[in-house]
Image: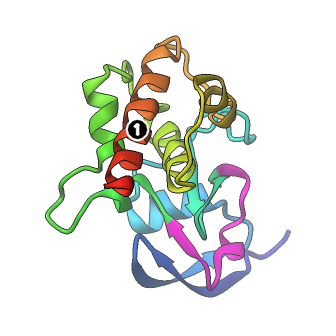
Amino acid sequence: MSQIQYKAITFTLNGKEVAASIDVRESLADMLRNEFGMTSVKKGCEVGECGACTVLINGVPYDSCIFLAIWIDGKEVTTLEGLMDEEGNISDIQQAFIDEAAVQCGFCTPGFIMSAEHLLREGKRYSRDEIRKELSGNMCRCTGYQNIVNAVEKTMEKRLEEKEA
Protein backbone atom coordinates (compact mmCIF):
# COMPACT_ATOMS: atom_id res chain seq x y z
CA MET A 1 0.00 0.00 0.00
CA SER A 2 1.48 3.31 -1.06
CA GLN A 3 1.38 6.42 1.04
CA ILE A 4 0.18 9.72 -0.35
CA GLN A 5 2.98 12.22 -0.72
CA TYR A 6 2.27 15.91 -0.38
CA LYS A 7 4.32 18.83 -1.60
CA ALA A 8 4.02 22.51 -0.80
CA ILE A 9 3.88 24.72 -3.88
CA THR A 10 3.48 28.42 -4.57
CA PHE A 11 2.34 29.92 -7.84
CA THR A 12 0.43 32.85 -9.25
CA LEU A 13 -3.25 32.17 -9.88
CA ASN A 14 -5.11 34.83 -11.84
CA GLY A 15 -2.62 37.49 -10.76
CA LYS A 16 -2.41 36.56 -7.07
CA GLU A 17 0.33 34.56 -5.41
CA VAL A 18 -1.11 31.47 -3.72
CA ALA A 19 0.19 28.41 -1.90
CA ALA A 20 -1.08 24.88 -1.47
CA SER A 21 -0.05 21.52 -0.11
CA ILE A 22 -1.00 19.02 -2.78
CA ASP A 23 -0.96 15.31 -3.48
CA VAL A 24 1.95 14.86 -5.93
CA ARG A 25 -0.31 12.71 -8.16
CA GLU A 26 -3.08 15.33 -8.41
CA SER A 27 -3.88 16.93 -11.75
CA LEU A 28 -3.84 20.69 -12.13
CA ALA A 29 -7.54 20.56 -13.09
CA ASP A 30 -8.45 18.80 -9.84
CA MET A 31 -6.33 21.13 -7.73
CA LEU A 32 -7.73 24.28 -9.35
CA ARG A 33 -11.32 23.09 -8.88
CA ASN A 34 -11.00 21.51 -5.44
CA GLU A 35 -8.47 23.76 -3.69
CA PHE A 36 -9.22 27.11 -5.31
CA GLY A 37 -12.82 26.86 -6.53
CA MET A 38 -11.98 27.54 -10.18
CA THR A 39 -15.11 25.90 -11.54
CA SER A 40 -14.51 27.19 -15.06
CA VAL A 41 -11.92 24.42 -15.38
CA LYS A 42 -14.08 21.60 -16.71
CA LYS A 43 -13.16 17.93 -16.71
CA GLY A 44 -14.37 16.44 -19.98
CA CYS A 45 -12.32 13.58 -21.34
CA GLU A 46 -9.55 13.59 -18.69
CA VAL A 47 -7.01 12.49 -21.34
CA GLY A 48 -6.11 15.84 -22.94
CA GLU A 49 -8.29 15.47 -26.03
CA CYS A 50 -11.31 17.77 -25.58
CA GLY A 51 -9.81 21.05 -24.31
CA ALA A 52 -12.56 21.74 -21.75
CA CYS A 53 -9.91 22.06 -19.02
CA THR A 54 -7.65 24.50 -20.92
CA VAL A 55 -5.83 27.07 -18.79
CA LEU A 56 -2.93 29.37 -19.59
CA ILE A 57 0.37 28.53 -17.90
CA ASN A 58 2.87 31.34 -18.31
CA GLY A 59 0.60 32.51 -21.14
CA VAL A 60 0.53 29.21 -23.05
CA PRO A 61 -2.58 26.99 -23.24
CA TYR A 62 -2.39 23.57 -21.58
CA ASP A 63 -4.88 20.80 -20.89
CA SER A 64 -4.91 20.92 -17.10
CA CYS A 65 -6.37 17.40 -16.80
CA ILE A 66 -3.06 15.86 -17.87
CA PHE A 67 -0.78 18.47 -16.27
CA LEU A 68 0.37 17.58 -12.77
CA ALA A 69 -0.27 20.29 -10.20
CA ILE A 70 3.28 20.01 -8.83
CA TRP A 71 4.59 21.22 -12.19
CA ILE A 72 3.12 24.70 -11.69
CA ASP A 73 5.31 25.53 -8.71
CA GLY A 74 6.65 29.03 -9.39
CA LYS A 75 4.56 29.51 -12.54
CA GLU A 76 1.63 31.72 -13.49
CA VAL A 77 -1.78 30.13 -14.13
CA THR A 78 -4.73 31.95 -15.67
CA THR A 79 -8.23 30.50 -15.70
CA LEU A 80 -11.39 31.98 -17.19
CA GLU A 81 -12.04 33.67 -13.84
CA GLY A 82 -8.77 35.56 -14.33
CA LEU A 83 -10.01 37.27 -17.49
CA MET A 84 -12.51 39.37 -15.53
CA ASP A 85 -11.48 42.81 -14.32
CA GLU A 86 -11.37 43.91 -10.66
CA GLU A 87 -15.07 44.87 -10.73
CA GLY A 88 -16.08 41.45 -12.06
CA ASN A 89 -16.77 42.60 -15.62
CA ILE A 90 -16.19 39.95 -18.24
CA SER A 91 -13.53 40.33 -20.93
CA ASP A 92 -14.11 41.24 -24.56
CA ILE A 93 -13.72 37.65 -25.75
CA GLN A 94 -16.23 36.44 -23.17
CA GLN A 95 -18.70 39.12 -24.31
CA ALA A 96 -18.11 38.19 -27.95
CA PHE A 97 -19.07 34.58 -27.19
CA ILE A 98 -22.36 35.89 -25.79
CA ASP A 99 -22.94 38.38 -28.63
CA GLU A 100 -22.23 35.80 -31.34
CA ALA A 101 -24.26 33.02 -29.67
CA ALA A 102 -21.11 30.89 -29.53
CA VAL A 103 -22.44 29.09 -26.47
CA GLN A 104 -25.04 26.36 -26.21
CA CYS A 105 -24.56 23.99 -23.30
CA GLY A 106 -21.46 25.96 -22.24
CA PHE A 107 -19.36 23.06 -21.02
CA CYS A 108 -16.57 23.60 -23.58
CA THR A 109 -16.79 27.40 -23.51
CA PRO A 110 -14.16 28.17 -20.84
CA GLY A 111 -11.55 26.05 -22.64
CA PHE A 112 -12.37 27.63 -25.99
CA ILE A 113 -12.13 31.11 -24.50
CA MET A 114 -8.75 30.37 -22.90
CA SER A 115 -7.38 29.00 -26.19
CA ALA A 116 -8.83 32.02 -28.01
CA GLU A 117 -7.30 34.40 -25.47
CA HIS A 118 -3.86 32.91 -26.17
CA LEU A 119 -4.40 33.37 -29.92
CA LEU A 120 -5.63 36.96 -29.42
CA ARG A 121 -2.65 37.88 -27.23
CA GLU A 122 -0.38 37.08 -30.17
CA GLY A 123 -1.60 40.38 -31.65
CA LYS A 124 -1.70 39.25 -35.26
CA ARG A 125 -4.44 38.82 -37.83
CA TYR A 126 -5.54 35.25 -38.48
CA SER A 127 -7.71 33.96 -41.30
CA ARG A 128 -10.84 32.01 -40.37
CA ASP A 129 -9.03 28.80 -41.34
CA GLU A 130 -6.09 29.74 -39.10
CA ILE A 131 -8.47 30.47 -36.22
CA ARG A 132 -10.05 27.04 -36.69
CA LYS A 133 -6.59 25.43 -36.70
CA GLU A 134 -5.51 27.32 -33.57
CA LEU A 135 -8.66 26.18 -31.76
CA SER A 136 -8.46 22.60 -33.01
CA GLY A 137 -7.47 21.28 -29.58
CA ASN A 138 -10.93 22.17 -28.29
CA MET A 139 -14.04 20.18 -29.10
CA CYS A 140 -17.69 21.20 -29.00
CA ARG A 141 -20.63 18.88 -29.48
CA CYS A 142 -23.28 21.63 -29.75
CA THR A 143 -22.39 24.70 -31.79
CA GLY A 144 -20.91 23.63 -35.11
CA TYR A 145 -17.98 26.02 -34.46
CA GLN A 146 -19.08 28.83 -36.84
CA ASN A 147 -20.22 31.16 -34.06
CA ILE A 148 -17.11 30.38 -32.04
CA VAL A 149 -14.92 31.41 -34.99
CA ASN A 150 -17.13 34.50 -35.45
CA ALA A 151 -16.59 35.51 -31.82
CA VAL A 152 -12.81 35.08 -32.03
CA GLU A 153 -12.62 36.91 -35.36
CA LYS A 154 -14.76 39.81 -34.06
CA THR A 155 -12.58 40.19 -30.95
CA MET A 156 -9.37 39.89 -32.98
CA GLU A 157 -10.48 42.67 -35.35
CA LYS A 158 -11.54 44.90 -32.44
CA ARG A 159 -8.24 44.42 -30.59
CA LEU A 160 -6.19 45.02 -33.73
CA GLU A 161 -8.14 48.21 -34.48
CA GLU A 162 -7.57 49.47 -30.92
CA LYS A 163 -3.88 48.64 -31.21
CA GLU A 164 -3.55 50.60 -34.47
CA ALA A 165 -5.43 53.64 -33.10
Reply yes or no: does residue 114 show up in magenta. Answer: no
Assess disc 1: are there few (<14), some (14-19) or many (≥20) residues with their C-alpha within 10 Å of its C-alpha.
Answer: some
Front position in the image: 13 or 163? 163
Q: Residue 122, position in %: x, y?
A: 57, 55
* Residue 27 relative to residue 1: left or right: left
* 36 versus 74 height, above or below: above
Tell me the quarter of the image containing the N terminus. bottom right
Q: Nearer the viewer, residue 165 or 133?
A: 165
Extreme residue in the left direction: 87
Q: Residue at x 35, y 46 (%)?
A: 161
Residue at image point 42% right, 18% down? 147
Q: Secondary structure at mark 1?
A: helix
- Residue 16 in percent (x, y) is at 38, 81
Residue under circle 1?
157
Indicate the quadrant where residue 47 lies: top right
Horizontal side of residue 125 vs 160, given as left or right: right
Look at the picture and state if 150 lies above or below 137.
above
Q: Is residue 72 left or right of residue 34?
A: right
The magenta span reads 65-77
Check the image and name the residue furthest to the right.
1
**Looking at the picture, which amino acid does disc 1 mark?**
Glu
From the top left corner, tell me how far across and down residue 88 is, in percent. Answer: 18, 59
Q: Is residue 4 above or below residue 101?
A: below
Question: How far across and how far down the image is residue 51, in percent?
Answer: 62, 38
Tell me: 92 left or right of 65. Answer: left
Q: Residue at x 73, y 52 (%)?
A: 66
Q: Quadrant of residue 155?
A: top left
